[in-house]
Image: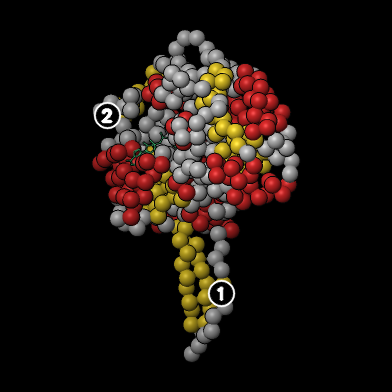
Amino acid sequence: MDSVSADVLDIVNPATEEIVTSLELTSLEETDRAIERAAAAFPAWRAVAPGDRARLLRRFAELVDGAVEELAQLEVANSGHTIGNARWEAGNVRDVLHYYAGAPERLSGRQIPVPGGVDITFAEPLGVVGVIVPWNFPMPIAGWGFAPALAAGNTVVLKPAEMTPLTAIRLAGLAREAGIPEDVFQVLPGKGSVVGWRFVTHPAVRKVCFTGSTEVGKRIMAGSAEQVKRVTLELGGKSANIVFADADLARAAAAAPYGVFDNAGQDCCARSRILVERGVLDDFLTLLENAVAGVRVLDPRSEDSEMGPLISAVQRDRVASYVGPGAPVAYRGSVPDGPGFWYPPTVLAPVDPASPAWTEEIFGPVVAVVPFTGEDEAIRLANGTEYGLSGSIWTENLGRAFRMARAVEAGNLSVNSNSSVRYWTPFGGMKQSGLGRELGPDALNAFTDVKNVFLATEQ
Ligand code: NAD
């Protein structure tokens, strides 16, 4: 990675290319010590009365609420997110904390009828949980891991991505101010191959909650098998936005750019493949191009900005490699002059479904359009990928909406909308987009084990 040297990390502002700050990388020995402290803190943390653990999480949420603007400004400088998005992201951490602050008193087990006694189950915390976070959504993805993990009585070590550690470090400071003991929630900025991999190999870490690329996720899963370590994996995506001829075309086209260019396309849920029913392809493309022309690609500090730069020069080069000479560019937007890792919103149409722009996750502001004829072909095209994270179906036909929603292999679908994420509903991928579910009521299962206890009552 371009900004990582031996032991010091330069944090670069992607919009200006200026160094924001430099940080020491956590070493292997420091990681071991942090994990040992987290393991030592576990018995006391799980023993905190449910109501008290809830109160600490609520206080943490309120401190995050008070720091939304500070956290948002930090994310704009570190990650180039638009200020509007960054405020939403900080608010999402607050909301996720409030939601899981409701969990400690509600983590009840079951009572199951058995002869000769009583059978009850307990939702037991696992111990130390290692959370590994990517650079694209540093705040929300950290919160989706640490909030339910802490609520369920686990202690947490969290590794932010190399390039984007600043908000996670500030969140750990706010946790401390809220009264959560230092060793219960520790943030360790450092390399994936050192700190992240130690979460996989250290026997005291009982669970790894990983969000990132499918390639690294597979390695985490294979490494975790050695200790039958629990994993949650949230991996890549290549989601389909399926537009039928009977849809409200104007609405579908107006929404499509924001379903893929939000966060400059660096979004695992990006609807980066648009499937359009053949009869309306030309009409849709005209509407889409107008909508893309309206996306405001501006300095991310500006209140009007809807899209900022990419995270790094490396990422920009990767994205550009999908739009080489001969690429079917139907429309290309503009970017500000001057420094920054900018790439214009780009529409490729029509694309060969065998081309890398259609099959690989680009993770940038490039969308590929392919026409289809009928539901069967739409399903075949949508499912013709190893990914299965999210997707959209645009139609005014209710039966078709449900048929398609059941047929598309993805964990998070929306009908006549491109919205996938609500903190109180489950989120996660099918096929190679992941394993397990975050958010909503499901996340607590991922941070607890079921213990069954039989108590004999016969003399
Ligand atoms: P990445 O896999 O390169 O890195 C993710 C994290 O893993 C980073 O913190 C990195 O330091 C760490 N890591 C790298 N190698 C490691 C190793 N050997 N052992 C342990 N940790 C290691 O991914 P990225 O480039 O930061 O993020 C982009 C990817 O994340 C995209 O593929 C995107 O789709 C995916 N993503 C998925 C979701 C989801 O919820 N499904 C959400 C956001 C991003």
| Residue 75 position within the rendered picture, expressed as x and y whole percent measured from the top left | 49, 27
| Residue 448 position within the rendered picture, expressed as x and y whole percent measured from the top left | 47, 58
Q: Quadrant of ligand 1?
A: top left
From mark 1 to mark 2, how far is it between C-alphas? Answer: 54 Å
User: Which amino acid type is marked by label 2?
Assistant: Asp
Residue at the (67%, 49%) spot, across then down: 402
Q: Quadrant of residue 51?
A: bottom right
| Residue 158 position within the rendered picture, expressed as x and y whole percent measured from the top left | 40, 41
Q: Which residue is mark 2?
A: 7
Total numbered labels placed on residues in the image:
2
| Residue 355 position within the rendered picture, expressed as x and y whole percent measured from the top left | 45, 32
Residue at the (42%, 39%) spot, across then down: 212
Residue at the (36%, 34%) spot, across then down: 189
Q: In this rendering, does residue 206 appear at all?
A: yes
Residue at the (68%, 46%) spot, across then down: 401
- Of the residues under marks 1 and 2, which one precedes in the sequence? 2
Q: Which residue is mark 1?
A: 112
In the rendered structure, the answer to whether residue 154 lies left or right of residue 303 reads left
Q: Quadrant of residue 379?
A: top right
Instruction: Work out whether 428 lies above or below 256.
Output: below
